[in-house]
Image: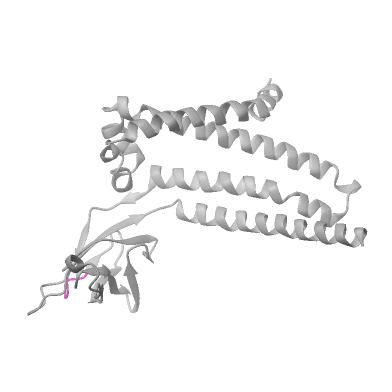
């Protein structure tokens, strides 16, 4: 019975059905997202479990497609794992009948499949288990302490890049690229780090993200007080999807190497 279930979970027919259902579900999701993105924005701040208990369950007419998506992606991961494992087992069983390097390169697509599973599991862990702190505000002279640690974060300087062109007069002297220099202190040790939009800082297992800042425009007289709003997350999924990306890169490199070697061999035979 277990063998039959394993074969069904790894069948190509199931793969096709899941892909068709994913296409249909994502189409419905596109329609439901129209003018309802505000329902999904809190996912980045409160995590999946809390979101399901609040926004998700009380707005099913707009969020049901998302729950279906989670189920379908889980089935796709299981299907990919079973199918890939079967292929790898078959290759290993034939290892004595093929060259060692040929076996090595044949594993490339399967490594990429495993990598995608690791990446998806990592993102699921992020949504399920990430610890998202309320927004923290930094000002000069008042450092903040990370929860459950003695580590502190202090604001050193705010060094934004201002819009100086005259092509858009309404944006003149407005901040276009905010750069924040932080001092990260842990006991007797300290270091500096630069924080920006899309450039978070990692410290003591936490991810520190720039959420907001003030001032947003260069003042003509006395500078207004600098305020930096931070979003701080402890995300156990980060190591998983970073490992998945590395594994996928290795598999892709193996696949491309085999392709180059095969082409050179064909050209040599033709010559």
Task: Tell me the chief SS of the magenta region.
Answer: loop
Quadrant that contains the N terminus: top right
Specify whether 178 is left or right of 120: left
Q: Is residue 253 above or below residue 194?
A: above
Quadrant that contains the C terminus: bottom right
Residue farthest along the top direction in this orientation: 1
Q: Quadrant of residue 192?
A: bottom left
- Residue drawn at point x = 91 percent, y = 46 percent: 97
Which of 233/159 is in front?
159
Q: Quadrant of residue 166?
A: bottom left
Instruction: Give the residues in magenta.
Output: 139-143
Q: Is 141 included in the stretch rendered in magenta?
A: yes
Specify whether 47 is left or right of 239: left
Coordinates of residue 127 in the picture (x, y in percent): 39, 44
Residue farthest along the front direction in this orientation: 167
Coordinates of residue 226 in the picture (x, y in percent): 16, 71
- Residue drawn at point x = 57 percent, y = 46 percent: 116
Q: Can residue 36 be seen in the rendering of this structure? A: yes
Q: Is residue 232 above or below residue 183?
A: above
Q: Can residue 186 be seen in the rendering of this structure? A: no
């Amino acid at each position: 019975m277990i063998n039959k279930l394993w074969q069904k979970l790894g069948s190509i027919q199931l793969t096709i059905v899941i892909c068709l259902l994913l296409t249909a579900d994502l189409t419905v999701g596109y329609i439901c997202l129209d003018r309802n993105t505000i329902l999904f924005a809190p996912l980045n701040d409160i995590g999946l479990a809390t979101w399901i208990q609040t926004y998700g369950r009380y707005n099913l007419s707009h969020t049901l497609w998302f729950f279906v998506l989670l189920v379908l992606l889980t089935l796709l991961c299981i299907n990919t794992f079973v199918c890939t494992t079967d292929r790898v087992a078959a290759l290993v069983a034939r290892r004595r009948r093929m060259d060692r390097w040929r076996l090595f390169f044949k594993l490339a697509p399967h490594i990429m499949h495993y990598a995608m599973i690791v990446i998806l599991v990592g993102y699921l862990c992020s949504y399920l288990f990430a610890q998202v702190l309320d927004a923290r505000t930094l000002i000069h002279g008042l450092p903040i302490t990370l929860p459950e640690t003695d580590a502190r974060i202090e604001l050193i300087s705010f060094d934004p890049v201002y819009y100086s062109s005259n092509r858009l007069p309404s944006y003149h002297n407005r901040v276009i690229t905010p750069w924040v220099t932080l001092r990260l202190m842990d006991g007797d040790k300290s270091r500096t780090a630069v924080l920006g939009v899309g450039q978070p800082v990692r410290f003591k297992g936490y991810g520190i993200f720039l959420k907001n800042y003030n001032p947003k425009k260069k003042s003509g007289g006395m500078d207004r007080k600098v305020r930096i709003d931070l979003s701080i997350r402890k995300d156990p999924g980060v190591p998983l999807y970073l490992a998945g990306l590395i594994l996928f890169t290795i598999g892709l490199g193996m696949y491309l190497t085999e392709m180059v070697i095969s082409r050179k061999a064909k050209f040599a035979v033709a010559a």
